[in-house]
Image (spheres, rainbow, N blue to C red):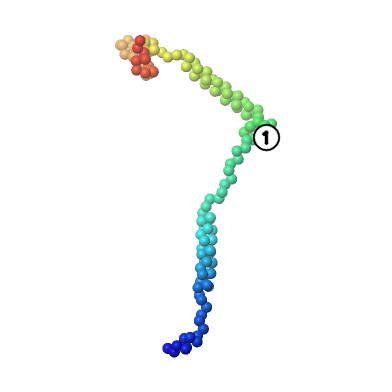
Amino acid sequence: PDPTLIESQPTPAPLRCRTTATMRAFALLLVLAVLAFTSAFMPAPRAPPSTSLNLKRGGQYVPDGLTAAQYADLQKKAAEKEAKKKQQWAAKRDKGFETLDEFMRKNIQKDGRIGGHRGPKFKFDGWFQE
């Protein structure tokens, strides 16, 4: 090869500048594509549930579908039911505990065995001994 021929040919423009710009554009498009792809599978943000009460009727809470009178009647029935339960438990509580002697006198059979399906309740070992 003739050295003058090689030197006389124009040198091409550096490809490095064009390649870097193309690579950056490609990288940017790739990042945008990944973001678009992942956002398609993310759940949509939901608004938090409302915590406000229904205070339309004179500042009192009344559930939807009921009038104020119906809701007051419902609350009154619930209060009566709760009071009745408290009275029943108070009656059981105030009745007291039966001792082992009382339990045996009530439940002893003619053959000497203790009948029934319930047993005495012991608070702790030896609580019934004097």
Residue at 50 percent across and 17 percent down: it is 90
Whether residue 56 sits left or right of residue 119 in the image: it is right
Amino acid residing under circle 1? Lys
> Crowdedness of circle 1 by 10 Å Cα count: few (<14), some, many (20+)?
few
Say which quadrant the N terminus sits in.
Answer: bottom left
Q: Which residue is mark 1?
A: 56
Residue 32, position in %: x, y?
A: 54, 61
Residue 57, position in %: x, y?
A: 68, 32
Q: Quadrant of residue 124?
A: top left
**Residue 95 versus residue 20 in the image, above or below:** above
Residue at 51 percent across and 83 percent down: it is 10
Residue situated furthest left in the rendering: 111
Residue 84, position in %: x, y?
A: 54, 20
Towards the viewer: 13 or 99 = 13
Say which quadrant the C terminus sits in.
Answer: top left
Residue at 30 percent across and 11 percent down: it is 111
Q: How many marks?
A: 1
Residue situated furthest right in the rendering: 58
Query: In this view of the protein, can residue 32 be seen by the observer?
Result: yes
Query: In this view of the protein, can residue 107 be seen by the observer?
Result: no
**Residue 35 versus residue 50 in the image, above or below:** below
Q: Quadrant of residue 122?
A: top left
Q: Of helix, strand and loop, which one carries label 1? A: loop
**Residue 41 versus residue 82 in the image, above or below:** below
Residue 34, position in %: x, y?
A: 51, 59
Whether residue 3 sits left or right of residue 49 in the image: it is left
Residue at 57 percent across and 47 percent down: it is 46
Towards the viewer: 122 or 125 = 125
